[in-house]
Image (spheres, coloured by chain):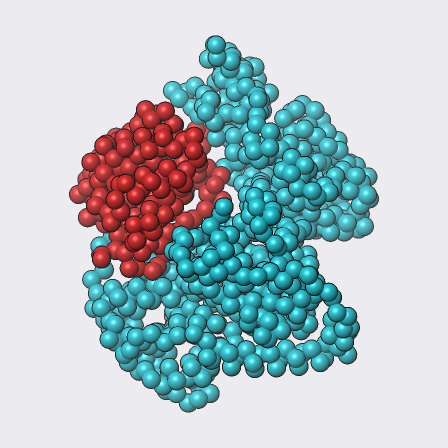
Chain colours: A red, B cyan
Amino acid sequence: MSTQRIVFVGVGGQGNLLASNLLGQAALAAGQHVVVSEIHGMAQRGGVVESAVILGDATSPIVSNGEADVLVSFEPVEALRLLNKVNKDSLVITNTRPLPPFTVAIGAAPYPAPEDSVVYLKKKLAKVIAFDGQSLAEEAKNPLSLNMVMLGALFGAVKLPIDVKTMKKVIRSQTKKRFAASNVKAFDLGFKAAA
Amino acid sequence: MDVLLSPSGGKEHLLLGNEAIVRGALEAGMAFATCYPGTPSSEVPDTLYRLRKQFPNKVKYYFEYSTNEKVALECAAGAAASGVRTLCTMKHVGVNVAADPLMTLAYVGVNAGMVILTADDPSLFSSQNEQDNRFYARLSGLPMLEPSGPVEAKEMTAYGFELSEELGSPVMLRTTTRVNHAREAVPFAKLGKVKKTSKFQKDPMRFVTVPAVSRNLHLRLLNIYKQAQAISEASPYNQIMGRGKLGVISSGVAANYVMDAVEDLGAKSKIKVLKLGFTYPLPEKKIVRFLKSVEKVLIVEELEPILEQAVRALAQEKGIAVEIVGKEPGKIPAKSVDIEAPGFFSRAFEYNPRLVREVMAKTFGLAFEEPAELSLAGMPAPPGRPPNLCPGCPHRATYFAVKEVAGDQAVYASDIGCYTLGVLPPIKAADFLVCMGSSVSSAGGISRATGQKVVGFIGDSTFFHSGITGLVNAVHNNHNFTLVVLDNGTTAMTGHQPHPGVNTEAIGDPTTHIDLEPLIKGLGVQHVVTIKPFKVRAAKKAIEEAIAYQGVSVVISQELCPLFARRVAPPTKRVFQVSTDKCKGHMDCIKKVACPAMYVENGQAKINPLQCIGCALCAQICPENAILPLKAEG
């Protein structure tokens, strides 16, 4: 099968690594070859966190510039920051709720309006899905479930070699019990928003 | 039960490279493990620690977080000399700390399998340099295995113990970040039997390295090299794949980029690859045969041209006139911080699939249309998002107090830990840093050389790692500076590992904790004071006195890391808010402390209640007393 390269980007604390790990687990459960790769360390202190899931026969654990098929961004300006990962045919799925970095609070840099970021994305790319994922996480009664919303959106927007049932089973069994139901709800809301 | 402890083999599990190393060690029956944590190696010891705590009756190995890598290796050496299979893990710079015992341990050897992990960090994702630890195999004479991903990481770890026992020598396992932090489906073999009991057999003519002993041991090491080379020649980890007149030699994670490129370039019938996994000693005969079978050879290796030089030397020695291409001599990437493909092989930074494919296509004259990268002209500039000290981090309060007292004129010697982030504005409290423990010794050097006011900062774990020896030196040589020990009760940066200063009762470990204050007094420091950094006025006064003191003074700033505290004692403090009636817009709260829970909206400072943990630092700084606890709901 052809290779699908999915890049997740977000801010430390948003659950990026959990999302890519769960997608990897689901791929394994679905019998697909998968390589997952993550960059953390200092990023855990509120910095940018990036991970990649490569489905298919490729063995390289990272995605080069211009080669991501899908970029899933948990925060609007982070989609811009990693835009060098995609090409004009790629799909970008982004949450539009901003999480301004401290550089903005101290006036060191302006924060681009999320609408402007989305307009720019749409100008550059054929396929852009942008929505307030944070409000869906809140609707699921679990503000920390944005990662599940975005994972749901990925499944809603892209044909993956993993069925939704398998993905949800992994979410239920691999996330904390008391959040399992709200995580699945968040996944469904994200799926609907992007489908 | 955790899958890592599953006794049976046969199944595949998605594992992080570091978890795969743990499984490999368990399959080999590892009985003893020591470490000092450090990215990208930390999940190896963390997993061993977690398994031991969660399943005390299931695991059969001893595990410890040692005070530093030198101690970890010396402790492990004792165990392996006594006949139990032993793992010792560290990051690349940790091997520098352990280098002293490493060189002589190579002479002495072991009586049971011993694997030493060096986790290297090309592109410096979280390190102070990007040294290539393949040199350590050459320097010490120890065999080296280099996995290309998690599957091989597990296999080679298990094999490393066998190899080590066969040779009577420790074996180095060298990974890079992209191996440690990649996940793959890893097939499991059965869990190994653990040989726990052992007896140290006295043999001073081997284990006591006086010159008369070591002369013989050097010859022993050279003989081991010869044996190891024969094993390397036959090793399935040094494998020739594909066919064709164009040759590629590669190792580590770069070998994956090569294999993907062969596929992408549609060059399966043209390119033959020698993939090396047993990389020291090199399989010279195999390399020579490979060189003779192709018309041109490209060497694909990250960082230093170690393979390249060895292959060139072999070709010269054997008179093989094949063209060898590798790093472009003298070419340096244009940018230092970006990890974009420079279009050629460089000695700096990690590689990526596109770079490797481009260089392979260029070298071999193969056509490939690279997918176009987007032109990003006119993009709204994303604001920088540097990592930051967490909301409620006590280091921020300590830095604030020290800066209020000593200002920008003092020189700040910093160290390795979360608090290194104090280098960023508005705190700007780091002027010099080379390695773990360097703040203490360099503070002495700077103050001696310049007579300037110097303040050193060091974390509690780092103090025990190697700050303590610097402090002994400072006292003995009558230096003049103030050392601030940022004691947050844990090893915060690498994931809250315990260390000798941690009160481990809270985490249920039966270790003895060592109090900093009497220890530091015992080292001979005359002026020692312990402060609570969130009591700003008292903290400032104590720091003022310490800095005014002539000689070595130490301030222990004691407050738990809030992320750690959340685990051991959930916080009960109330969060704060800015009273818009009282706020006059000085913005001291924003400008001086940079707490990520604070932000500005329409010119008004505000606090995000989801992020605030009620440390009250900003409330004490506000000149209008406009920051108040939020009233409890209901």
Q: Residue at x 25, y 64 (%)?
A: B264
Q: Nearer the viewer, residue B391 or B625?
A: B391
Image location of residue B277, percent across then percent down: 45, 70
Q: Is residue B301 visible?
A: yes
Q: Residue at x 74, y 39 (%)?
A: B515
Q: Residue at x 29, y 54 (%)?
A: A32
Image location of residue B419, percent across then percent down: 58, 40
Image location of residue B492, percent across then percent down: 58, 41
Reply above or below: B509 against B287.
Answer: above
Q: Nearer the viewer, residue B543 or B617?
A: B617
Image location of residue B434, percent across then percent down: 60, 52
Q: Nearer the viewer, residue B267 or B476?
A: B267
**Image quadrant in which you'd find residue A75:** top left
Q: Is B534 positioned to the left or the right of A20 in the image?
A: right
Q: Nearer the viewer, residue A168 or B263?
A: A168
**Image quadrant in which you'd find residue B565:** top right
